[in-house]
Structure formats: C-alpha cells, structure tokens
Image (cartoon, coloured by chain):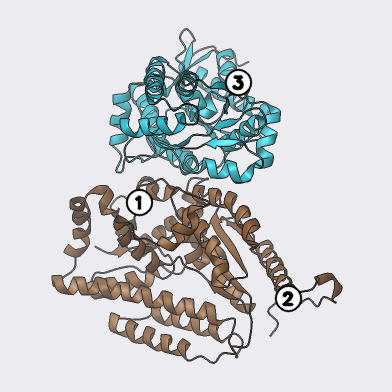
Chain colours: A brown, B cyan
Amino acid sequence: MVITFPNMGNVALAMQTLCQSLKIPYVLPGRNNKATLQIGSYYSPEEICLPFKLVLGNFIQSIEKGADTLLITGSCGPCRFGEYCELLMKILSKLGYNNLDFIVADLSSEIGIKEFMRRMSRISAASPISRSDKIKALYTAFKVVELCDKIDAMAYHLAGYETNKGECKQVLNEYKTKAFECKNPEEMMRLLDFYKKYFENISTNNNKDPLKISIIGEIFTIIEPFSNFYIEEKLMDYGVSTRRTLSPSWWVKNLILKPIKMDSKDINRAAGEYMPYAVGGHGRECVGEAVLAKGYGMDGAIQIYPLGCMPEVIAKSILPAIQRDKDFPIMTLIVDEVAGEAGYITRVEAFLDMLQSKKRHLKVQEPLVSRPVTVRCLGNHN
Amino acid sequence: MNIGVPRGLLYSKYHVFAETFLEEIGAKIVVSPATNKLILDEGVRYCVDDACLPMKVFHGHVSWLKDRCDAMLVPRFIGIKEKEYICPMFCGSIEMVSNNIPQLPCLIDTPICSTQNYKLSQWAKKTGSVLTKDENKIMAALDKALQRHGNSKTGFNDEGYPLKIGLIGHAYNIYDKFINMDLKKKLNGLGIGIITSEYINGADIADEAGKLFKKPFWTFAQEYYGAAVCIIKTKKADGIIYLSSFSCGIDSVVIELIKSETGDFPFMVLKLDEHTGEAGFDTRIEAFADMLKRRCGIGHNLS
C-alpha cells in the first residue's frame, strides 16, 4: 500500500508528517503546477469546478509515481465536493488504472461510526506502530497543520509592516520548501518552531498603516495558492496585509465542533442577517466573514471561488448588499483553468488603488477632488 | 390578497400543490406567464452572471410579478427526502432574489423540508398565517393540496412514433417550452416520441442509484441517473437526450456518471443557455435523429 492524497495548501504537510510517523509508504503530491491542471482538466467533465480538476491531476501524477491507495475526504451535500469520490473512481478506472484502492473519509455522522472506523482501519492496519503511537501521530499531524497555518497567517499579516521589504515572502517560501524536505515529524516540529519564533521576532515598523484585505470565498481555492494565482504572495509584494479565517486547521476544528453546534458561532451569527440558512460549501462562512471583516479593521475583501461554485454564487448575490450597508468594498475573482493571469492582476491592482485612495480620503476627511492626487505605484519596483 | 407564484424552477412539478393550497386558504393567485423573451431578459439583467439559466429565468418571473401582487411565494426548497437535497441554489434562492431584485413585495419564504409530515404542516401553518388564523382551514387546505398533487401526473410517454428517446433533465428545462425551444415538438416532428423519467419505475430508479459507491445526495440526480441507466439496460428507448443548462453543478456530475454506463448506447447532451442559437440546436437534434434512424434501420433515404 502506497498512499497518496490531494495537494491542498498545508494539508499536504500534515499528511506527510502523519504518514511518516505511521510509517506508511506514501507519495507526496508535488506542488500544483500547469501540468497538474492540464492533465486534470483534460480528463475531467467540462463543467466541474476547478478543485476537482486539480485533485484529479494530483492523483494521476501520484499514481504515475507509484501510489495505489487514494485518500480523499468526502461530504454529504449539498455541494458538489461530496460527489468527487464517485467521479474520481469512474474516471480513473476509465483511464485504465484498475488496481486502485479508494479511502473516502466521509463524515462519521453521515455514514455511521462503524463504516467510518472500517474505512479508517484500512490505513491504520498498514501501520506497524502501536495504537497509542497512532493517536499521538494524529495529534502531531494536527499540530503541524495548525502551526503551519499560524506561521502563514503571521507572514501574511506582517508583510504590511516589515522593515526589510520582501523578507516575509522570502522566509515564507524558504520554510515551505524546507518543510517538504523533512524526513521525520521531530525535524518538522523543530523547523516549524524555528520559523514561528523567526516571525515573532521579525523587525517591523508599527507606524506603517498598510492596506488590510480579507480573503474570503471557497475554501479550496483560497487555501491552495496555485488555484488563485498565489494571490496572497502577490499582495505581500504590494505591502498589503492579508487575513484569512478559512484554513485547513480551521476546517478540522469546525468539523469536530459541528455536531455540538459550536462551529464558528461568530461567523454564523454575523451571516444570519443576510443568509439565515446554510447553503452548503462555505457560502455562509463567506457572507459571515464579509460582515465581520470591517470590524477586524480591514479595508476591503476579495472573494475567490471556482467558476460555477453554487454556494459562492449565492454568496456573491448577497455581497453587494453588505458592501452597501457597511460601506465596505468587496471584489469577486472567479478562477478556472482558462483564467488569464494578467487580467487578473490588473483587477487586483485596480482594487488596491481604489482602496488606497479611499483610505487616504478617509484620513484627510475632506473631498478627494480638492487635493492633488498622487497615485502610489503598486508595482513590484523595489 | 393577491399572491404571486413565479412560473419558474419547480413550478412545473409542484404547481398543483401550491395553487390548490393557496386557493383553499383564500388567496387570489397571480401566476407569471410562460417564459418569454422579456422575462428572460429581465432575469439576465437582475441575476448574477454566474448563475444557471433556470435561476435567471426565475429572476425574470419574480421581476414580472413584483408589481402585480401583494405577496409572493418564493419557495425555499431544502429537501424533499431525508438527508437529501435539491441543489444549493434552491436553499439560497430567496437570498439571491431578494438581494438582486429591488422593490420586491413581501416574500413568503418559509423553508420547505417535506421529509416528514410534521415539517410540511409546519410550513403550511407558517405560510397560511399570512392569510388566515384558522388552523383547521390551513390543515384542510394542505390535505386537499396533497391529494390533488398526488393525483396530478407530469411527464411524457409518447406512443405511436417510429422511434423513441428518453428525455432526461431537470423539470424546469424540460417543461419550459421557451428556453428549450419546444424540443418536444421538434422531436415529434422528426418522428421521435419521448419518455421522461416520471414514466420509469421508481423502484428500478432507486435500485440503479443504489448501486453507486455513494448514492447521490441530490434527489433529482438520483432520479435522472437511475432513469437513464434503466433506459439503457432495458432498452425502453432507442437513445437518450440529456437536456442540461450551462453551469448546472448537478448536471456536470450526473452526465459524467451516466456516460460511464452508456457503452455504445446513443446519448447526447443538449446545453441550454441564454445565448443558445436555434439553428445550431436544430442541427444537433436532426443529426442525432438521423443517426438513430440509420441505427434502427428506418428510412434509408440518404441520397
């Protein structure tokens, strides 16, 4: 059994640690790239959403490298994500990959705890370590993804305040590369601790007042940087501080708290006024965060979702109302396999320009037109 | 009190129920006219551009009704079976409509979750309370509506044509003659009768859907997949046309699932959107009809 899993931001790092400590052979999906997307969209149904195309691309690439067991999380509606496993099975068997084993981690509340344990036992049976060590391994993996998310969040936030321009982005990339090379969990934890401390002590200028943007939208496309053209890193180049609530560790915590209805209460409460009923996916979270963002001191929000994502289309209908009620600019970016990067960047730059002048205008407290407008160049000219 | 009922989305499936219920509790019903160019244009104007065609059409109907009624029934269908859904868009249809279209009258938006009887009666009580305080009247209306709904039958099963195809797809695509450019008439004109999923045995459909690794959690996805596979296996028809609308999330999955079962059974997908040109549509249907005729050995007049 050689296990593999989809590449989805920091999830891959957690899974790498988990497989290492369980001593299960695994194939690490490489970082998503053009080839992944090309393979994925070639074999996918035309109108399925972008995450599916990337997941399929990941799997085909990993199978070529020798993986034979595919691990994928599931859900039971109403969004398309829950049907991924069925489609993957059909498509991969059509492509001639017949000896594959699928482990679908559906919610235990949907398929029953017995079935859930049966599915999970297929992974744990392949591991030679003791039961208590397995639980420890699971805990370490969660710790890893939590730490990674924390470091990422710090880096994205501090990018607006850093004294040495570009430091945050450079260090962020450095740690990601090193993390994928870690051979065992202990090494990973040491590395992450080091970088966490690094970011805690990074030199910043707190007198700066950078633009602050909240990234909201569909979870896959906001946590997997390839699918959104590395938007957070691009915003770091512009000296913008970004904030994002949805992350792999948030998702895990949310899932655990859901049965007792303690999941992200603040977001749901905030969304309630505009969207009283859940619509699947993370549509409600998107609305809730848009409502809350201004209170966090954000200047604007960017909603990102894959073309045709049903819950986010509903959220998109509601965002203009929030924009109007709260005087809070929100831009929507839709990604798919044919989205052109240049047009995309132009839109982001225009949005930043707009936020910048709005901010200046608010600070001066007088009409913008009466002042000579100096447009700050937002390009990466350092 | 005038209550508007938009002739969009699941109207074709549940109009008997809705109209009977509202009439029985003493409402005067205003139903929007069959979809036309004006309604479609209005819908496209108001709705977000990423939504599917039926949703845009629905916006058009709501917009037509907004000045012509005192309240509007915009049903929020959560599900009609336990642990199953219709589509995320249906759960949020009210939010879409109310945020996209200005100056709407009061919307009756109680969620419908007809998985159990008591949930349905809760819906009826809340909806009925707009008009009457008399609970007995509401419950009587509900019973009558359910009974009439049970007796009503939708769907097509044409007899007497040399060829027959299964026409599968969402009710709001199949029964809206404007957006599908009267596909039934076109097919009948080519000597093809149609059978829809309502005429396939429900038990067989459930059986086929149950064979999947994971039974689809969309009620209609199960129905369409099961019906299509039944037609393929029992050869109830000579081919299948799947009528889908652009960017329908459910169809993107169902079509792929059906395709993996077709083998060499004739199967064609027709996509609808607000730009669909009729000529290209006709050509595809004619080509499919020709192919079926040749396959079944009818009319070798190809000279």
Residue B225's x, y, as percent? 39, 33
Three-letter code, disc 3: Asp
Three-letter code, disc 2: Arg
Same-chain status of marks 2 and 1: yes
Q: Chain of mark 3?
A: B
Q: Nearer the viewer, residue A17 or B77?
A: B77
Three-letter code, disc 1: Ser
Picture disc at residue B293: none
Inter-mark Cα distance, 3 to 1:
38 Å
Mark 1 secondary-structure assignment? loop
Residue A194's x, y, as percent? 39, 89
Confirm or deny contact between disc 2 and disc 1 (CB under 8 A).
Answer: no
Q: Residue at x 38, y 83 (%)?
A: A192
Give the residue at mark 3: B182
Residue A34 appears in the figure: no
Give the residue at mark 1: A75
Picture disc at residue A360: 2
Q: Nearer the viewer, residue B171 or A26?
A: B171
Q: Chain of mark 1?
A: A
Which of the 4 image quadrants contains residue B64?
A: top right
In the picture as drawn, the residue positioned furthest to the left comes out as: A130
Mark 2 is surrounded, within 10 Å at the Cα level, by few (under 14), some (14 to 19) or many (20 or more) other residues, namely: few
Residue A301's x, y, as percent? 59, 65
Residue A124's x, y, as percent? 19, 64
